């Protein structure tokens, strides 16, 4: 967690060897999010979030994973740590993507940049809604619009359309207290399951 915290305030300079080790560790944690052991999965998710921006390269590289659990973990974490710098990096990688699958995964991640989530690491905060929408308006939508005009792959074009919809939808995955009606409905469902 300390490494991630230092990196957040730009106080860390790591050697190439250290960055490779962090990348390898991040990838191993991504593999662990698929574990059959709940504790191991939760530990892996926290470790990825603790590393924060130090895990970004591994997260971006694994967005197009054939394993949907790994891909989703990458999307969620990138959304939580969004910044102008991160969005610019994803845009750059989208321009340089060497396959429609990678390009689509990167575009999909841009569509997730207005999602609101709660980090697992105490003291970490996600970008607020107004700043997220500002970045979507100034960086993401103009890029997607220009890409749509030049793209020919039908699957990539479909992903661009979906990314626009996701930006508007702005899914809210933050934990909220349940009201009395929701609690009653949950109790009723649990009783039916018995």
Image (spheres, rainbow, N blue to C red):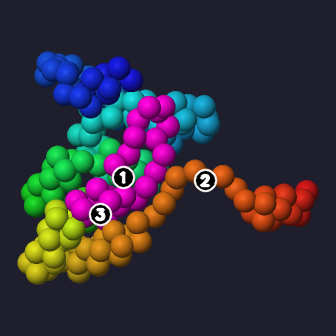
Give the position of the C terminus as an image quadrant: bottom right
In primary-sequence order, the first of circles 3 and 1 is: 1
Q: CA distance from mark 2 to mark 1?
A: 16 Å
Q: CA distance from mark 3 to mark 1?
A: 9 Å
Q: Position of residue 29 (x, y in %)?
A: 41, 33
Residue named by callout 2: 176
The vertical placement of 142 against 68, above or below, is below
Secondary structure of residue under mark 1: loop
Give the position of the N terminus as an image quadrant: top left
Magenta region: 109-136
Mark 2 burial class by Cα count in 10 Å: few <14, some 14-19, many 20+: few
Secondary structure of residue under mark 3: helix
Q: Position of residue 41 (x, y in %)?
A: 54, 36
Residue named by callout 3: 133
Secondary structure of residue under mark 2: loop
Q: Report whether 100 appears left or right of 41.
A: left
Report the front residue among 189 and 70.
189
Residue named by callout 1: 128
Q: Position of residue 147 (x, y in %)?
A: 13, 73
Dividing the picture into quadrants, the one containing residue 134 is bottom left
In primary-sequence order, the first of circles 2 and 3 is: 3
Report the front residue among 106 and 119.
119
Residue 28 visible in image: no
């Amino acid at each position: 967690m300390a490494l991630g915290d230092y990196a957040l305030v730009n106080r860390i300079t790591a050697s190439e060897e250290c960055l490779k080790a962090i990348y390898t560790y991040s990838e191993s944690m991504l593999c662990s999010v698929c574990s059959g052991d709940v504790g191991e999965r939760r530990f892996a998710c926290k470790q990825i979030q603790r590393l924060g921006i130090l895990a970004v390269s591994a997260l971006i590289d694994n967005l197009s994973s054939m394993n949907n659990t790994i891909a989703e973990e990458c999307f969620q974490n990138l959304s939580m740590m969004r910044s102008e710098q991160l969005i610019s990096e994803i845009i750059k990688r989208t321009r340089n993507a060497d396959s429609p699958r990678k390009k689509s995964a990167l575009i999909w991640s841009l569509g997730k940049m207005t999602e609101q989530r709660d980090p697992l690491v105490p003291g970490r905060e996600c970008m607020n809604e107004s700043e997220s929408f500002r970045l979507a308006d100034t960086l993401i939508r103009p890029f997607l619009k220009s890409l749509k005009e030049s793209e020919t792959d039908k699957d990539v074009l479909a992903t661009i359309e979906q990314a626009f919809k996701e930006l508007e939808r702005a899914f809210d995955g933050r934990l909220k207290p349940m009201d009395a009606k929701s609690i009653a409905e949950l109790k009723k469902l649990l009783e039916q399951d018995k």
